[in-house]
Amino acid sequence: IVLAFCATSLAGYVLGTIFVTRGAGLAAIQNEFLSSVSHELRTPLTSIRLYIDTLREGRISDPVETQRCLTVVHQEITRLDTLVGKLIALSKIESRRAAFERRPVALTEVIDEALVAFKAISVGSGVDLHVQVAPELMVHGDRGALGQAVANLLANSWKYTDAETRRIDVTTGADSRHVWIVVTDNGIGIPADEQKIIFEKFERGTAAIDRDSTGSGLGLSIVQAIAKAHRGKVEVHSEPHRGARFRITLPRWRSEAA
């Protein structure tokens, strides 16, 4: 209960920071955002309260059932912790308070960072992963943040592809001014009318809802925020049942010697 209270308080702090810094002229957007956050917090908190009440009132005597209840409570607290963590990260990035390191970084380093995070969530599951990265391509930015953005795209592709046939490709490319990282999957795809809203906070496509897939609807918002913080952008090209192709485009960095 204490952890849940702390998570709720911290989320309130994040929301307060966002609202104050953006000014009173965005009241409608703020109210909509608050409603979304409240909904996302209310669901796990309700579950936690119900299970705690059940245990506190002694309605369960079977040790196995007691352990199951405690497991659910732990999962919901973890869910809250993850949600609040993402809110804090997004708030810092959007308010430009995130302490990004700015240095020349090879795209190979960014992809390596992403793969470490991705393997942690996909361990034990089947995925046909193909990576082709041009070693000479570089950007000026934060390896950890950019790695997180790519890892979020990998996690998104992993979540919306079928385990039996799952394939994800990571490629890079460049022109004279820009470099890009592309994550392509063979998943369920995204309808055209949803391809813009999926980058908004707490927005999830109909496929995610239909599949009852877990998630906060913040992963792609964080990708977009990190890309913008590096003077870049993220785009998606997709058709239903024909997979999705996400592309992060960033300014290219060249050494003076080049």
Image (cartoon, rainbow, N blue to C red):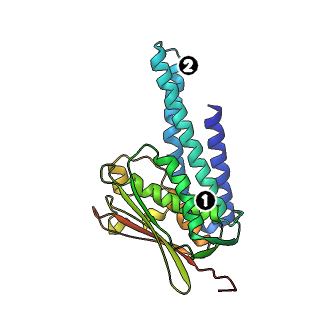
**What whole-number distance in Å separates the C-alpha atoms at marks 1 and 2?**
36 Å
Q: Nearer the viewer, mark 1 or mark 2?
A: 1
Residue 194 versus residue 119 in the image, above or below: below
Which residue is located at x 69 percent, y 64 percent? Answer: 21
Which residue is located at x 50 percent, y 53 percent? Answer: 118
Report helix, strand or loop for mark 1. Answer: helix
Which residue is located at x 32 percent, y 51 percent? Answer: 162
| Circle 2 Cα neighbour tier, 10 Å, few/some/many (<14 / 14–19 / ≥20) | few
Q: Is residue 154 visible?
A: yes
Residue 151: percent from left, percent from top: 52, 58
Q: Is residue 35 visible?
A: no
Which mark is drawn over residue 56? 2
Quarter assignment of residue 129: bottom left
Report helix, strand or loop for mark 2. Answer: helix
Along the viewing direction, whichever of 155 and 135 lies nearer the viewer: 135
Q: Work out which residue is located at the far left of the displayed protein and give it.
A: 241
Along the viewing direction, whichever of 4 and 19 lies nearer the viewer: 4
Residue 57 versus residue 228 in the image, above or below: above
Which mark is drawn over residue 90? 1
